[in-house]
Image (cartoon, rainbow, N blue to C red):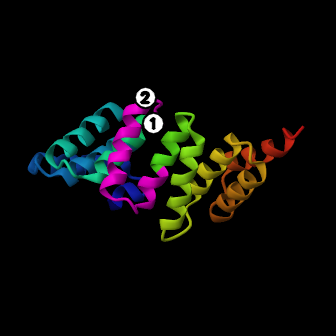
């Protein structure tokens, strides 16, 4: 997806749309079209593409994860989103991205103790440090009122990639100490 990575999301969408028209039964193309649709804000259509990718290839872990993560990101059907991502993790139990997604959706379901385990597994299985994983880990530690661990996780995220929102979380953590 060269165009999408270069910020040319509309072009990527058009190219994947054409590819899907030529190969409508290709689950990978459907998944990539879903990603492109998501990037241009057409989330309802992205959901349909992920669902179609799953229908075409019932063991397509990436499509399950993408669908569940999109639902969770939008705060929709969190239980169903959790089930989708859990299915992806069962298909690929060492996939760091899927483990992170499951931890994040469990956090959103107000289940931080369970979420922590998956985030730690995600870090353990990650090939390279990922700022989003450490951000999610910081959120989980903060929910568990483990401020030092939250601060350490957010610091690691900021070292990997500066981010103003995470910096605000970190600053707010210490401002709110009684």
| Residue 175 quadrant | top right
Residue 67: x percent and y percent? 34, 41
Residue 154: x percent and y percent? 69, 54
Q: Nearer the viewer, residue 167 or 111?
A: 111
Query: What residue is drawn where x is 74% and y is 48%?
Result: 146
Residue 10: x percent and y percent? 34, 46
Query: What residue is drawn where x is 58% and y is 50%?
Result: 116
- Report the predominant secondary structure element of the magenta stretch: helix
Residue 167 is one of the magenta-drawn residues: no
In the rendering, which numbered label is found on residue 72?
1
Q: CA distance from mark 1 to mark 2?
A: 6 Å
Whether label 1 touches label 2, CB < 8 Å: yes
116 sits to left or right of 170: left
Q: Nearer the viewer, residue 12 or 89?
A: 89
Query: What residue is drawn where x is 19% and y is 47%?
Result: 58
| Residue 120 quadrant | bottom right
Most distant residue in the bottom direction? 127
* Residue under numbered circle 2: 76
Image: magenta residue range: 72-100
- Give neighbour class at mark 1: few <14, some 14-19, many 20+ (Cα, 10 Å): many
């Amino acid at each position: 997806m060269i165009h999408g990575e270069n910020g040319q999301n509309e072009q990527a969408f058009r190219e994947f749309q054409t590819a899907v028209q030529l190969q409508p039964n290709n689950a990978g193309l459907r998944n990539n079209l879903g990603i492109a649709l998501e990037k241009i804000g057409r989330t309802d259509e992205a959901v349909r593409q992920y669902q179609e990718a799953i229908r075409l290839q019932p063991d397509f872990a990436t499509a399950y994860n993408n669908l569940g993560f999109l639902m969770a990101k939008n705060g929709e059907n969190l239980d169903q989103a959790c089930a989708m991502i859990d299915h992806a993790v069962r298909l690929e139990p060492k996939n760091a991205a899927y483990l992170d997604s499951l931890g994040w959706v469990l956090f959103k379901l107000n289940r931080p103790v369970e979420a922590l385990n998956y985030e730690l597994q995600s870090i353990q299985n990650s090939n390279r440090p990922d700022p989003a994983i450490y951000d999610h880990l910081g959120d989980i530690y903060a929910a568990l009122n483990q401020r030092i661990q939250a601060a350490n996780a957010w610091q690691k995220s900021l070292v990997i990639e500066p981010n103003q929102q995470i910096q605000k979380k970190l600053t707010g953590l210490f401002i709110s100490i009684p």
